[in-house]
Image (tube, helix red, strand yellow):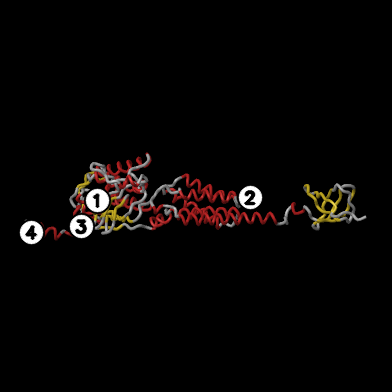
Amino acid sequence: MRKFIGDWFGRNRAALSVAVVLLGSFLGVSPNDAQTARTALVLQLEGIVGPALSDYILRGMRTAAERNAPLIILQMDTPGGLDTSMRDIIRGILGSPVPVATYVSPSGARAASAGTYILYASHIAAMAPGTNLGAATPIQIGDLPFPGAGEDKDQDAKPKKDGDDAVTSPTPHSPMEAKAINDATAYIRSLAELRGRNVDWAEKAVREAASLSSSAALKENVIDILATSVDDLLAQANGRKVSAGGNEITLDTRGLPLEQINQDWRTELLMVITNPNVALILMMIGIYGLIFEFMAPGSFFPGTIGAICLLIGLYALAVLPVNFAGLGLIILGLAMMASEAFVTSFGVLGIGGVIAFIFGATILIDTDVPAFRISWPLTAGIALTSLALSLIIIRLVFSSHNRPVVTGSEEMVRAHGEVLEWRGRQGHVLAHGERWAAISETPLKKGQQVRVAGIEGIILKVEPDQPESN
């Protein structure tokens, strides 16, 4: 019987293949769809967690969901980043119908600060040997002194008696600081409870900035897998049950093929323009381009470049945690410096604009992540350049005041002329090669030299240029 069935399949293999293809076409499934669906997508979370990296990760998750991929592998090596971008990634993981395995690798990598939260949120948390995680305290709190800082050193130097509480963690010094650290603690605890991982150590990572090596993290039930490679991770994850998209899923990952999703030009461009220093430079180019366009209408080039740079800079600021008071001060400062070119304030507007700009740039980005701070040398360079332009404008204003007027009706005042004809208190004079109607309080005569004392409309007020000789 077995031989008969084998022979029958051998004779009808071609017909069976055609039948499978036709059935797949009828159901809307191509022969390659099954292979595509059985491919795990690999995303790289490397460097500072910011808007560009968040956008790249979320688009990768959407691609995995559209392909109905069995697994997303998030290879991570990060020192942390922006809270807003971190929460966007975590929301993407929690809402993903495709399980996410975050893998801290290669050896020497870390999942610090924001990376710890992302690792806790993942369906599978894995680390390579020689990696570490933790130090999840918000930077604003982590920079605080320990209890007793600033107190009498002699008191601190005294040996503590038995039973004295040991100081191991920074303590918030204000309600706002306490609010921030309590919020961060509650957030990571909720992620730990959701994934069934060590809740107490999660809180310790926030309150005490605790860190763990990969082997210690496995012992403490902070991670699920200690894997030497991605293939090892897939082998150990095989058969595990996770909850993704509201469904219980049993992972079938042994021998799963991988597809790397690389960062495209959009992500790379976003990484450049979301650098606060680049965004500030783009805004400056944009504003000065528009100023030059208004000063010389019709040139088009500075106005076009300025408008493009300004819009790109504003887009970058829209995705960054911007302090609107700082942005308002920068706009006010630039407006005051620009007004110096149109309003004679003898430097008051220019210098005031520079001061407003410096204060605004200092508080523009509402974060303490070093990679997203405005560079002091850049701020000083832009401020000094703007101040130099203001001083040049002031110098031009003063020099223009000292120069004689050479155009317009004002130039006619003090001009010299000759009486062409005169009768009583009015007549005509020749000034600047033109015949003018003129009036005078002093009787004049033909041929007499006069000087223009004023002008009313098109009538000159003249007076004798020199006393008549007897």
- Mark number for residue 3? 4
Q: Where does the image place residue 355, in percent across and percent down from the top left?
A: 53, 49
| Of marks 4 and 2, the one in the foreground | 2
Residue found at the very far right of the displayed protein: 470
Q: Looking at the figure, which quarter contains the N terminus?
A: bottom left
N-term mark: 2 or 1: 1
How many other residues sit within 10 Å of disc 2, few (<14), some (14-19) or many (≥20)? some
Disc 2 designates what residue? 344
Report the amino acid beneath label 1. Ala
- Mark number for residue 74? none
Residue found at the very far left of the displayed protein: 1
The reply to whether residue 152 is visible in this rendering is yes
N-term mark: 4 or 2: 4
Disc 3 designates what residue? 232
Report the amino acid beneath label 3. Asp
N-term mark: 3 or 2: 3
Report the amino acid beneath label 2. Thr
| Of marks 3 and 1, the one in the foreground | 1
